[in-house]
Amino acid sequence: GAGVSQSPSNKVTEKGKDVELRCDPISGHTALYWYRQSLGQGLEFLIYFQGNSAPDKSGLPSDRFSAERTGGSVSTLTIQRTQQEDSAVYLCASSLALGDGGTEAFFGQGTRLTVV
Amino acid sequence: AQSVTQLDSQVPVFEEAPVELRCNYSSSVSVYLFWYVQYPNQGLQLLLKYLSGSTLVESINGFEAEFNKSQTSFHLRKPSVHISDTAEYFCAVSPNTGFQKLVFGTGTRLLVSP
């Protein structure tokens, strides 16, 4: 696609429910990242995928958070038993994985999650 | 580990005035440095980056940033701002080996008024 696509753009859910957030990266980008943008916390790294593998998932806040990537393309971030502190904008980014930290990462517009 | 500090949460300026958005970082390893911009209701966009070579880097819309290793800074400047520059600006660093694990500052909101 032309850019990184995330869905839904907005999600309101009740505390305790599970949610799934989807990311479609730019075609051909083998690296995929999830970040979280919340008030007072700024932008936090959650997880990185290289292909379908996740070499670094150190930013996932708790075991309620999980992510997978299939076919080296689409990724899903799942939050189980949502809590109010999970409310944030979840951003996905993708890049060509050249083994070089300077490769530009392209960001989607994010999913705004509100837990009520 | 890395950390990024943007001391100014908000910077109000008048149109055509110069502006500087400050960024300081700390890291135990060599890093690449980035400035991202987020316009209202839009996603993050890369504004400019420093990887190596000349310490002064420029963007296509007139912004520039200078890497100062001794002061561990990467301040963003523009000599004359436009209303359209109103946005949130994020400084970020990433280790210069391995994948790009961006560590962001908390952002600076630039408010340009007529």
Image: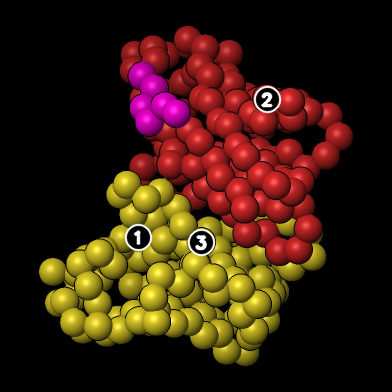
Q: Secondary structure at mark 1?
A: strand
Question: Vertically, is A64 above or below B5?
Answer: below
Q: Are marks 1 and 3 on the same chain?
A: yes
User: Which callout, 2 or 3, points to the residue nearer the camera?
Assistant: 2
How did the renderer colour the structure?
by chain
Q: Amino acid at mark 3?
A: Phe
In the image, taking residue B60 as reference, residue B108 lies left or right, namely left
First to last magenta residue range? B7-12
Q: Kindly indicate whether the residue at mark 3 contacts the one at mark 2 (C-beta within 8 angstroms).
A: no
Residue A45: numbered disc: 3
Report crowding for label 2: few under 14, some 14 to 19, many 20 or more residues within 10 A (C-alpha). Answer: few
**Chain on which label 2 sits:** B
Q: Nearer the viewer, residue B46 or A85?
A: A85
Q: Supply the letter of whichever chain is red.
A: B
Residue drawn at x 44%, y 82% as measured from the top left: A66
Check disc 1 and report the residue beneath it: A89
Check disc 2 and report the residue beneath it: B71
Q: Nearer the viewer, residue B105 or A105?
A: B105
Q: Nearer the viewer, residue A52 or B32?
A: B32
In the image, taking residue A13 as reference, residue B63 lies left or right, namely right
